[in-house]
Image: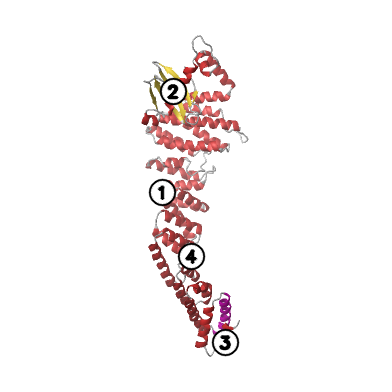
Amino acid sequence: MMTTWYWPANIYGKKKKVTDVTPIQNNIYIAKVKDGRSYDIEIKSPLAKRQKATCECGFYNQHGICKHIIAVLYAIKDIQKNVAKPGKKHITLHINQILQDADTDDLKEFVKAYAKRDKKFATQLKVHFARKIDISNNEEKYRNILNTIVKPVTGATQKVSVTDVRELTKVLDDFAGQINDCIALGQYREALNILNATFAKLEYVRSKYNINTEALTTLSKTYHNIIGYFFSQKIPAELRQDLLSFLYDLLHKSFYVINDYRQNIIYCLNEVLKSKEKNILIDQIEPLLNTDNGSDKTILLALWIKLIGKVDKRIMEHLDKYPLLKIGVADLLIQDTENKTALQILKAIHQQKPNEKNIINRMIFIHIAEKDISALTALVKKTYFMTGDTMYLSILKKEIAAEDYQVFSDNVEKTIFKEKEIDAHISMKFFKNENNWAAMIIFLEHQADLQLARAYDTYLYKMDKSAIAQSYIYLLEKNIASQPESIMKTLEDLNHHWRQNKMIEVRKTVIKFLKEQHPDQPELAGQLTSA
């Protein structure tokens, strides 16, 4: 007697499927429970004090009992309740009763006739029993099942219905479970037979029919994850080579499109291959870059670099062919924490475009992630002198210790006073950012630039009125001597500027200076006293 029983909805929060509950000799029952994968259960003397039970799941191995055994016990109890007592008629008609009492030949004839009339039933029948029937080409067996649902494309206008896609999704999901079961049971050849047919069909339908439903995308991830599970087993060398050959062949099919950095054959194999095998995989990528099947070249380049572990001359030549893809490649490597190779690409771009902030920002991110303080401080210093963006100073201040930042600040100050080509405004902005107004005063006098003084005098006036007044005296004295023809215009502009910004102390100090030091030129002081 065989039956299918569904776990009540109030047990464990959802239905679990118990199938093939079969009593055999000496009060022993065997059954299957589908819970993600299929588990075989055996129970001796069920519902008795001395009952014994076994299950394949990990929870049973640790605790000697599990939910799967409990589910089968419920099923057995349910079956025993529904078995008709001698001399009594059934109140209702149950499937269990039909299967128990029906003639085997009649049942077979009914299944055959129903399968002829109902395509979906026939398909499910084949899917369920396919593993139990051995033919000359078992891979072809699974391929034919799938082709009865969705046929290969034979014309440009061929379409597939939503119903067919839904049925194919269900069957492929079923086969994915069977593959995992085969691997778990050590039936590696059968697992490969199913994988060869189903994985290729899945990717074929997604590409050729341009169907990327959420369900099919999820299934694709499931099948890609199976690769890692398969290779984690100690499979025979010959079968391992067959598996690799299948995956390499699928990789080069026109319908196998790589548009996800992690969910693809290359990425999955990189995690499990030995070094010699990885060299063969590396050689698979360059031909893919020269084809146009819709695969994302940015992803292919990033995967190639990940496999090699560096940006060699050959890869750089390809990157130069696709200059617009370089940043995208670097971003994928950064997301995958392949920071060193990403930095190689970014440095090459940075040499050609030193002012590109989006490149600089990525390089700074990598230096922070790698805790490379030396490289970080050097890049921030260089970048600040090029851009004058104090954001980079703030980033550095946040990432390094206070004493280290002080050393950096002192170093920048020395560079400013040493290197004359540094933009004066960038230098003044640095001192202002550091609240180093004393250095600003000294720098102003070094520059002898009245326009520069006017740009920062309101800030300095708040810090030290006397200091900025003395700086103006120093700068005006130089201008009176070197540019006497324009000094009156300069004083007029300064008078207006000081009045507008209410810098009274500066005006008073400078007027006093001009009267005392240039009594023979009263018009100088007079220019500052006029309204």
Q: In this view, does 415 lie above or below 277?
A: below
Question: Dot 1 corresponds to which residue?
Answer: 309
Q: Quadrant of the C terminus?
A: bottom right
Task: Classify mark 4: helix, strand or loop.
Answer: helix
Q: Is residue 243 left or right of residue 148?
A: left
> Which label sits on residue 523?
3
Q: Where is residue 488 in the image (x, y as percent from the top left)?
A: 57, 83
Question: Dot 4 corresponds to which residue?
Answer: 386
Residue at point 52%, 34% (across, down): 202
Q: Earlier in the sequence, mark 3 or mark 2?
A: 2
- What's the distance in space between the residues labelled 2 and 4, CA to CA? 76 Å
Range of residues picked out in magenta: 484-500
Bin the neighbour count of mark 4 within 10 Å (Cα to Cα): few under 14, some 14-19, many 20 and up. Answer: some
Q: Which of marks 1 and 2 is nearer the N terminus?
A: 2
Bin the neighbour count of mark 3 within 10 Å (Cα to Cα): few under 14, some 14-19, many 20 and up. Answer: some
- What's the distance in space between the residues labelled 3 and 1, CA to CA? 75 Å
